[in-house]
Image (cartoon, rainbow, N blue to C red):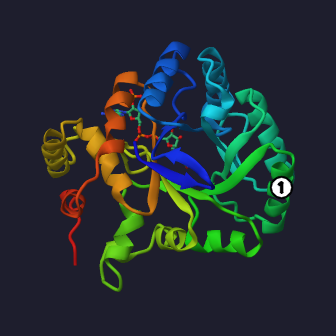
Amino acid sequence: MKYCNLHGVNASGIVMGCMRIADKPLRQTEEVIVEALRAGVNMFDLADVYGGGNSEKVFGVAMRDLEIPRKDYILQTKCGIRKDENGRINRFDFSKDYILSSVEGSLKRLNVEYIDILLLHRPDTLVEPEEVAEAFEKLRAQGKVRAFGVSNFSAEQMRLFRAFGVEIVANQMQFSLGHTLPVDAGLNVNMYKDESVTRAGNALEYARASGIALQAWSPLQYGFFEGVFIGNEKFPELNKELNRLAEQYDCAPEAIALAWTLRHPAFKQVITGTTSPERMRALCKAGDIELTREEWYGLYMSTGKILP
Ligand SMILES: NC(=O)c1ccc[n+]([C@@H]2O[C@H](COP(=O)([O-])OP(=O)(O)OC[C@H]3O[C@@H](n4cnc5c(N)ncnc54)[C@H](OP(=O)(O)O)[C@@H]3O)[C@@H](O)[C@H]2O)c1
């Protein structure tokens, strides 16, 4: 397993994402956690909104049942997305009061004393950065949260926060062979191509220059949760290349896909969302694979991308 330094903590390159555990049998989730820990995963990613709060509850119960000491794993959760009574997202909220109350709710549902990393889930355009700084300072002083980060932020949004003294250790954003936007623009600077448009807000370059770890979410999905690209007939060349490398590295094609994401120096971590113990075991092999530059570019081009 690869590890990275996340705010002085040795964190696994593969992180278990818990967005999809809310409606799964508890026993199954416990088996996935056991497989992940066995493979060297020491970090878990949640959010207050996953399963309407149920993912945090289920995770808390699973860790209690499994008797995993709190000090033995890194717990990351998020806040800032608000929903209406029908469960539809109706606003983002980075106000001080909301951040503080949301953390109280997460601590209770997770049944823990502290959160290692709190991420602000999606940019709130009405944000007052001073309020965020105050909320973070209070949570840190109370010992309720140890470090902070963001998710789906552009370079300029991270820069704004840092100008107000808000410390950011991580930015979580979508990146995979099915969603290559974070690298496309940097490979096609100053050209009349769709790929030249900076849709990912130059987050990659800013994060690297500022020592902010990027975390990749949905490493096997294409589009916005349109499906998995593995074994999907829409991506014949990509699957051919994934299968070829899987045979070479003696692993599943899924593991090659995760290894591709982790091979990028900006993406220190990949958040896998599988709820299957067998898949978790297979995917974790990615933590031991270092693709060559040629293999990395070969996979990129097998998605249909052309280098200038
Ligand atoms: N910050 C954000 O805005 C944001 C947004 C989305 C997600 N996230 C985080 O990222 C994590 C991962 O997201 P994700 O669940 O969409 O990621 P993913 O790992 O790309 O997708 C996992 C899903 O694909 C299914 N799947 C189907 N075929 C598969 C195969 N061959 N191999 C592996 N999985 C296959 C899995 O089913 P099985 O369970 O049956 O394996 C599972 O439902 C989430 O848990 C969450 O922590 C963050």
Q: Residues within 10 Å of mark 1 (few under 14, many from 20)?
A: many
- Rendered image quadrant of residue 151: bottom right
Give the residue at x 82% y 37%. 104
Q: Is residue 287 left or right of residue 125?
A: left
Give the structural element (helix, strand or loop) at label 1: helix
Residue 37 visible in the displayed image: yes
Q: Position of residue 16 (x, y in %)?
A: 49, 36
Q: Position of residue 181 (x, y in %)?
A: 39, 64
Quick check: 81 above or below 29? below
Q: Which residue is mark 1?
A: 135
Give the residue at x 49% y 73%. 202
Quick check: 221 above or below 30? below
Quick check: 28 above or below 43? above
- Rendered image quadrant of residue 84: top right
- Disc 1 residue type? Ala
Query: Extreme bottom residue here?
Result: 190
Where's the C terminus, which quadrant? bottom left
Q: Is residue 225 left or right of residue 53?
A: left
